[in-house]
Image (spheres, grey):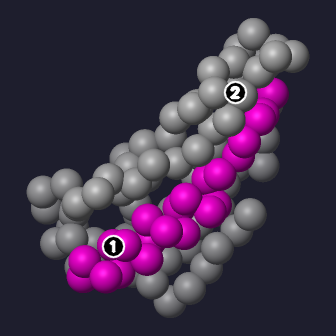
Amino acid sequence: MKAETKLFTMRPYSALPCALEVFRVKGIKAYESDFGEGRDVKGPSDDWEYACGDMRFFPYRTPKAGVLAKYGITLAEYREICKELKKVLFVGECGWCV
């Protein structure tokens, strides 16, 4: 799922839906790790030992030091980006890494 607004552009890899091939905030190359982290909340899939059972993105409750300044964004814009990252990087069960 691709997402694009005036504030950001997000496009996951086609064969790695839990990571972004393209992520820009106000035209600046951005990093998911500045906004949160992905975790498999269920553990390995029942079908594949190394697959994800329920991969999701979890935003940080508050921005890491310097992130707002790094991207020139407000707290409201940070939250908007985090909300969209949760949607775009919600994968669920996946076996692409197997």
Indicate whether 48 appears above or below 36: above
Q: Residue at x 23, y 60 (%)?
A: 62
Q: Does residue 74 show up?
A: yes
Left or right: 49 in relation to 71: right
Indicate whether 70 appears above or below 31: below
Q: Which of the 4 image quarters holds residue 3?
A: bottom right
Label disc, if present, on residue 78 of the rendered structure: 1
Q: Which residues are magenta?
A: 74-95
Badge 1 element: helix
Q: Quadrant of the N terminus?
A: bottom right
Which residue is under mark 2? 52
Q: Which of the 4 image quarters holds residue 76?
A: bottom left
Indicate whether 40 appears above or below 19: above
Taking the view exactly as shown, the residue that stands out farthest to the top is 49
Q: Position of residue 90 (x, y in %)?
A: 65, 51
Q: Position of residue 55 (x, y in %)?
A: 63, 38
Q: Quadrant of the C terminus?
A: top right
Indicate whether 34 appears above or below 55: below
Q: Nearer the viewer, residue 21 or 4?
A: 4
Taking the view exactly as shown, the residue that stands out farthest to the right is 47
Q: Residue at x 70, y 27 (%)?
A: 52
Separation of residues labelled 1 and 2 (CA atoms): 27 Å
Q: Does residue 97 show up?
A: no
Q: Position of residue 21 (x, y in %)?
A: 61, 53
The reply to whether callout 1 and callout 2 are in contact (CB within 8 Å) is: no
Sequence order check, earlier mark of 1 and 2: 2
- Going by the numbered disc 1, the residue's amino acid type is Tyr
